[in-house]
Image (cartoon, rainbow, N blue to C red):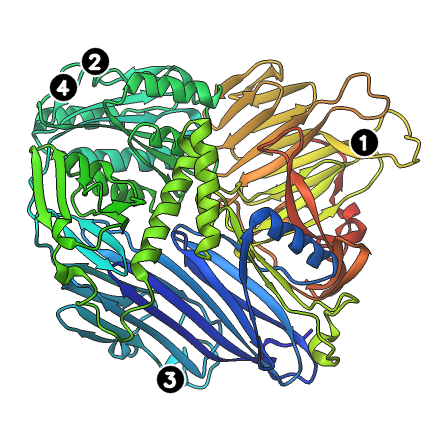
Amino acid sequence: MLKKKEVEVLSVTVDCTVTSRFAHTVMTSVALNKANVSQEIFFKVELPKTAFITNFSMEIEGQVYVGEVKEKEKAKKQYEKAVSSGQTAGLVKASGRKMESFSVSVNIAAKSNVTFILTYEELLQRKLGQYEILTRVQPKSLVQDFKIMTNIYEPQGIAFLDAHATFLTNDLLPLVDKTVTDKKAHISFSPTVEQQRKCPGCDGTLIDGDFVIKYDVNRGERFGDIQIVNGYFVHFFAPPDLPRVPKNIVFVTDNSGSMSGRKLQQSKDALVHILSDLHEEDYFAVIKFDHIVLPWRDSLSKATKENVEEGKTFVRKHHPVGGTCLVDLRITVLTENRLPERSVDMVILLTDGMPVSGEFKIQENVQSAIGGKMSLFSLGFGNDVDYSFLDVMSKQNKGIARRIFEASDAALQLQGFYDEIANPLLSEVELRYPDNAVDSLTKNHFNHLFNGSEIVVAGRLTDNDLDNFLVEVLGQGEDYKAEGQASTLDQEVPYPNEEYIFGDFTERLWAYLTIQQLLDKSKSGDPAEKVNATAKALEMSLQYNFVTPLTSMVVTKPETEETGPLIADKLTEGGELIDLQINISCGTAVSSKIPSFAVDGDPHFIIELPEKNDALCFNINDKPGTIFTLIKDTKSGVVVNGQTIGDKKIPPDGKINTYFWRFGITHKTLRVKLEVSTSDINVFQDSKWMTMYWSNSISLKGTNMDLHVTKDRSLTVTLKDSVKFVILLHKVWAKHPYHQDYLGFYTVDSHLLSPAVHGLLGQFYHGVEYEVSELRPGEVPEKPDATMYVKGHELNVTRGWQRDFRQDIKNGENVPCWFVHSNGTGLIDGDASDYVVSSLL
């Protein structure tokens, strides 16, 4: 295995230019292969989820290979052709709360270097009175030339600016250079190699974390600030010193069994704190729900000190009861007693689960109940929430959705979101422009303006006579009305011709906003609107070279007649060295399915490793009736065993398939047992046995274990303060000549299990280190082989995919993975026979 020290990172440069809140960032990295043989060099960075990649290029041996944005389906065909030739893929995937991870590798000749250049753009969003530029830097090694440079130009003037980093020590802090004048700011950070070292003489680097710049601009005119460049305008509206508008707010909280434990306590803590922040002129209500709806009071209550304390008492007394059922949730407490007259109505929904009944019916019911009179803000808590469902439902009702990550700071996340919407200033805000002067206008009607936020509208000018460019802003709350004239001074004159400006930024800002809004409409509009919005968003993504959920970027290295180390490990008969496809998940980064450790099918094990943006898979083949240990944690007492079943008879091809048909789950500490088969579910809890059947949807709440059965589909098992599983039922036609019903097993939350956890699945819960190189054609064209170095073994692996059936029980969703042959030999500890046991429980 090649040692990492044989790759030297010569330089890392992050160059960000911000002009009127629109940020253009270029990340450049130069790496040298110091080895005497060719090898893979990896480029991995993280970028904000709100950004669009606009370019990726590589320079190898003096030749530059530039990416091209293509329609996703067309790019996919080119990508599949490349993969079948044994070439490399680069991916963009979700990585944490704010970032996406971009990674690619390329084979580089001995003693040669490669330059990677990634460019992305985003409109900075104002939250809580400031803009944030977040740059994540993780070079993993000392860098000869390391630079972060940011230039900001704001025509309105910079009100304040702060720069810090999570990795800054007392020695590094003076290296952050800030120069701020009236309208410009220059920030740089460039430590030497010695200053990067963790300790004198060691190779470890201090540079590992987030470099964050926060700033705001001056506010002047009541109608906002308009900037015009090259025939496009952008209008920023966030007037200073507006009084807050009283709000009528209903907190609707999920109190089902799945919320028990830390999640419920965190939601209580956050809601108690939020109630304390209510202003006395506000009115509020609290509703809890599970399989029933239980309001605190039948109507809104004024946020007096006494009422707030009583509301807190109700919140603290919440106890989880049953399963989540949103279909019967009716929000009616706001429809009467709406006080005061000039106020804003809103509902905040907090849930961690999926709807029991049909999504469309629930959305229809909620929309009917709200009737366009209120705004719905949905907070999806944890890993299992159906976020896309909440997102659409919120947008249908003048609100937004936000994911709350299941972590120790969940209460702070809840509080942070509330802080953003706690102080409404205006509602039904409309920004008007002369009809004969503009076209291609972005959204110009907004349901709310909250304190610390900002409204942005952009458009294209059809009349260059700015004397006729009259702007009018209307809003409710204080009967707001403001008018203003766009001055000729707004056109181009204030913009300096230097490093603070990039290209036609107003046009690109307009395009960015338009595409974002079209993508929203493609998810929540009527069928015709969805089709039209999708088509227009695709057209503009291609025109402006944005990588969006509808497009992909492909970098193709053309055929070459060169021979030698540069192409030795990669080149196939086709002569193409590398194809790169960049995929961004539709919707938000959080819209991807939840990473898990699973076994399904005959039987296929899938180990998803989100920190590597990858997955491993292997099969275990043994005689029917064998019982395997999947999970065993001696410290916590959790044990999961599974028993296989074979086909009814030998198929014509002579191969007998085996599947899992029974699982035994034991938690010795909690004294619970669970035996799940394809026919029924037997539960031992609170010192007694009971039986449930797949033919009914049912929720069971116990002291130490919650169960939720979705009829003929799935069982969700939540063990108190330890782990969460989903078991899927695959029903086969009863008269099928060979196959039988079987089960799939998915671990969706294992972070509380101890480091000692083991088993065929359990041994991977805390990660596995491996490297893959020497990609080459396999037996099947679309499944290349490679060499994997893992646990001291050198294995031949194959790139393929397995199916995850959680979202689509019939067809499943393909999960790309590296397949380890021979019953996982070399990947799993020991031999498959080491995991065979005699008893299910």
For the residues bearing labels 4 and 1, Cβ distance under 8 angstroms: no
Describe the element under mark 3 as helix, strand or loop: loop
* Residue 90 image position (x, y, % from top left): 58, 60
Based on the displayed image, in which of its 4 quarters is residue 645 positioned? top right
- According to the picture, the residue beneath numbered tag 3 turns out to be 192
Q: CA distance from mark 1 to mark 3?
A: 63 Å
For the residues bearing labels 3 and 2, Cβ distance under 8 angstroms: no
Residue, x 44% and y 42% (percent of image)?
536
Q: Is residue 653 above or below residue 489?
A: above
* Amino acid type of the residue that numbered disc 2 sits on in the rendered structure: Asp
Q: CA distance from mark 3 to mark 2?
A: 65 Å
Describe the element under mark 1 as helix, strand or loop: loop
* Residue 482 image position (x, y, % from top left): 8, 42
Q: CA distance from mark 3 to mark 4?
A: 62 Å
Disc number for residue 298: 2
Of 757 and 322, nearer the camera is: 322
- According to the picture, the residue beneath numbered tag 4 turns out to be 338
Considering only order in the chain, which callout, 4 or 3, is on the residue closer to the N terminus? Answer: 3
* Amino acid type of the residue that numbered disc 4 sits on in the rendered structure: Arg
Q: CA distance from mark 1 to mark 2?
A: 57 Å
Is residue 345 visible in the rendered image? The answer is yes
Describe the element under mark 4 as helix, strand or loop: loop
Q: CA distance from mark 2 to mark 4?
A: 13 Å
Using residue 225 as the reference point, say whether residue 557 is left or right of it.
right
* Residue 479 image position (x, y, % from top left): 7, 32
Disc number for residue 625: 1
Of 644 and 697, nearer the camera is: 697
